[in-house]
Image (tube, rainbow, N blue to C red):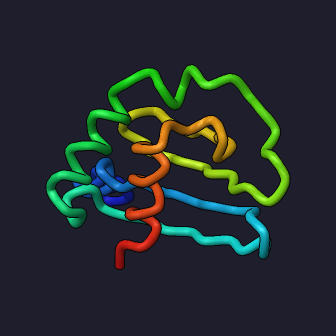
Amino acid sequence: MSGSVPPESPAEHERLHLERTGGFAGMRVDRQVDLDALDPEDAAAWRALLGSPLLRDLPEEPPKPDRYVYRLTHERAGLDAVVAEQQLPDDVRDLLERTLRHR
């Protein structure tokens, strides 16, 4: 068919967009990561987190001074969340930081 748009690949639906701003130096870090490219334990942790209500149910809260703000977007899970660092459980914050370091 002429003019038709090809369907997105399955990998497109497993792509996580993660952004961290703020902190003492005000640096911005932005990553798009395919969940399948992560360590299997981290990929499983992300899938569990994306399927849970945790990030969706956090109330809006301004960041504390010199703390980070994270924005997480995942199309398949219908997630577009902005959360202040102090709102996150330690294990979730650690997962975000490992993912931001992933290359």
Horizontal placement of 67 versus 103: left or right? Answer: right
Q: Point out residue 93 in the picture as x, y percentages from the top left corner.
A: 49, 49
Residue at horizontal 27 percent and vertical 43 percent from the top: 45
Residue at horizontal 60 percent and vertical 71 percent from the top: 29
Asked if residue 36 can be seen in this view, the reply is yes
Horizontal placement of 42 versus 53: left or right? Answer: left
Residue at horizontal 36 percent and vertical 73 percent from the top: 102
Residue at horizontal 37 percent and vertical 24 percent from the top: 52
Horizontal placement of 59 versus 19: left or right? Answer: right
**Residue placed furthest toward the bottom:** 103
Q: Point out residue 67 in the picture as x, y percentages from the top left corner.
A: 73, 55
Quadrant of the rendered structure where residue 80 is?
Answer: top right
Q: Quadrant of the N terminus?
A: bottom left
Q: Quadrant of the C terminus?
A: bottom left
Horizontal placement of 79 versus 58: left or right? Answer: left
Q: Nearer the viewer, residue 8 or 24?
A: 24
**Residue placed furthest toward the front:** 90
Asked if residue 1 can be seen in this view, the reply is no
